[in-house]
Image: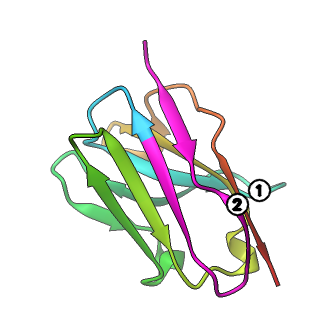
Amino acid sequence: QVQLVESGGGLVQAGGSLRLSCTASFSLNGVGWFRQAPGKQREFVAGFTEGGSIEYADFVKGRFTIARDSAANTVFLQMNSLQPEDTGNYLCNKRSYDSWSWVRYPWGQGTQVTISS
């Protein structure tokens, strides 16, 4: 049974930091973080390719860092210098067809990140 559990979200002021966790029941290769703001489409944030390389969305601009603990089957997203536009529901999933536009599994509930100005 596929399991995806995201955690670590919360309410912080602009300029603050959060560390998100994604624990999965499957291999972490190809796993990435996505986010969806109210009224907007879901978008890719950061992820590990199948070969283990790291990719970031342009808007991350060095503020976010993705890491993983293979023993715990968990992917982390350290987010610094958060801005109100980073507000949204953050989710993780494994990509399909080597593209962040497609994911393999049903979405979990995600973890809500709210940044106040």
Q: Residue furthest left?
A: 51
Residue located at (45% from left, 62% from top):
77
Who is closer to the viewer here, 87 or 51?
A: 87
Q: Amino acid at mark 2?
A: Gly
Q: Which residues are magenta?
A: 1-22
The foreground one among 24 and 86 is 24
The residue positioned 65% from the left and 51% from the top of the image is: 42
For label 2, the residue is: 10
Residue 102 higher or lower than 11, as above or below: above
N-terminal of the two: label 1 or label 2? 2
- Residue 113 figure quarter: bottom right
Q: Disc count in the image?
A: 2
Residue 115 in the image: state x and y as whole percent. Answer: 75, 73
Q: How are the colours assigned in the image?
A: rainbow
Nearest the eye: 110 or 8: 8
Q: Label 1's element?
A: loop
Question: Which amino acid type is marked by label 1?
Answer: Lys
Q: Quadrant of residue 8?
A: bottom right
The quadrant the C terminus occupies is bottom right
The quarter of the rendered structure image containing the N terminus is top left
From the top left corner, tell me how far across and down residue 107 is, in percent: 58, 32
Disc number for residue 40: 1
Answer above or below: position of 58 versus 27: below
Q: Residue at the location (72% across, 59% down)?
A: 88
Tell me which residue sits at (42%, 83%) in the image.
62
Residue, far top? 1
Q: In the figure, 50 relative to 60: above or below?
A: above
